[in-house]
């Protein structure tokens, strides 16, 4: 019997994946929402645009949640009782956490910039701001996809 059970390490990896998504989303949303409060004091008609842009960094929380659910429901039942598979899943969870956290934080910065320009452009920057935020979103999506690929390559899915 090993000192640390592989399933414990896998659970920790899943929790870290979710935690990274939640941390990044909360920071990204706070950054965008702060810009939204200032924008709404200038132009209350931009409320819908502010809500959409400020909510975009929330998706990384869902990506982290998906990885955690996959680890808990699919990976752990297939995890060997010995060996380094638990550390592998922990590493994948750390990679997921980093991708989701940094993606959400920087997406919040992009959204905040778009939000701050809504009054000046009378809302015409909205579509461009969403498109630019989607580029940063792609890193979060890739974090999810790469995690699934890595778990699959390890034969854990």
Image: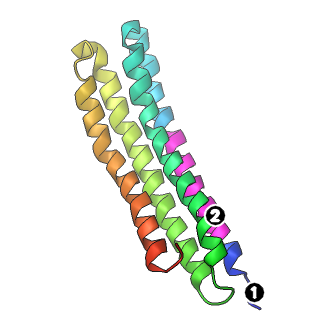
Label placed on residue 73: 2
| Residue 78, above or below 46 | below
Question: Is residue 20 visible in this depiction of the protein?
Answer: no
Residue at 43% across / 52% down in the picture? 102
Left or right: 74 in relation to 106: right
Q: Quadrant of residue 113?
A: top left
Q: Around disc 1, counting alpha carbons within 10 Å, would you say few (fewer than 14), some (14 to 19), or many (20 or more)?
A: few
Residue 125 image position (x, y, % from top left): 23, 23
Classed neighbour count for the residue bearing mark 2: other residues with Cα under 10 Å, few (<14), some (14–19), many (≥20): few
The dominant secondary structure in magenta is helix
Whether 156 is drawn above or below 96: the answer is below
Q: Can residue 45 be seen in this view?
A: yes
Q: What stretch is highlighted in magenta?
A: 10-27
Whether the residues at callouts 2 and 1 have beta carbons within 8 Å, the answer is no
Looking at the rendered structure, the secondary structure element under dot 1 is loop
Q: In which quarter of the image is the N terminus?
A: bottom right
> Which picture quadrant has residue 10?
bottom right
- Taking the spot 50% from the left edge, 70% from the top edge, the residue there is 92
Badge 2 marks a residue whose secondary structure is helix
Give coordinates of residue 115: x percent, y percent: 35, 24
Rendered view: 13 above or below 99 = below
Is 73 left or right of 46, judged from the image as shown? right
Task: Decide: is 108 above or below 67.
Answer: above
What's the distance in space between the residues labelled 2 and 1, CA to CA? 23 Å
Q: Examine the structure image and report whether residue 61 is included in the region drawn in magenta.
A: no
The residue at the point 46 percent across, 19 percent down is 37
Q: Name the residue under label 1.
A: 3
Residue 53 percent across, percent down from the top left: 39, 29
Count how many numbered circles sit on residues in the image.
2
């Amino acid at each position: 019997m090993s000192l640390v059970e592989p399933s414990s390490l896998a659970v920790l990896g899943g929790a870290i994946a979710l935690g990274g998504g939640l941390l990044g989303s909360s920071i990204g949303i706070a950054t965008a929402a702060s810009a939204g409060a200032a924008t709404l004091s200038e132009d209350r008609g931009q409320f819908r645009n502010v809500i959409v842009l400020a909510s975009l960094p929330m998706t990384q929380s869902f990506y982290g949640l998906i990885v955690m659910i996959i680890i808990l429901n699919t990976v752990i039942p297939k995890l060997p009782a010995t060996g380094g598979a638990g550390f592998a899943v922990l590493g994948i969870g750390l990679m997921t956490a980093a991708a989701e956290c940094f993606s959400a934080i920087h997406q919040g910065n992009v959204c905040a910039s778009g939000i701050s320009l809504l009054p000046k452009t009378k809302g015409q920057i909205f579509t461009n701001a969403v498109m630019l935020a989607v580029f940063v979103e792609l890193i979060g999506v890739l974090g999810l996809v790469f995690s699934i690929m890595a778990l699959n390559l390890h034969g854990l899915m």
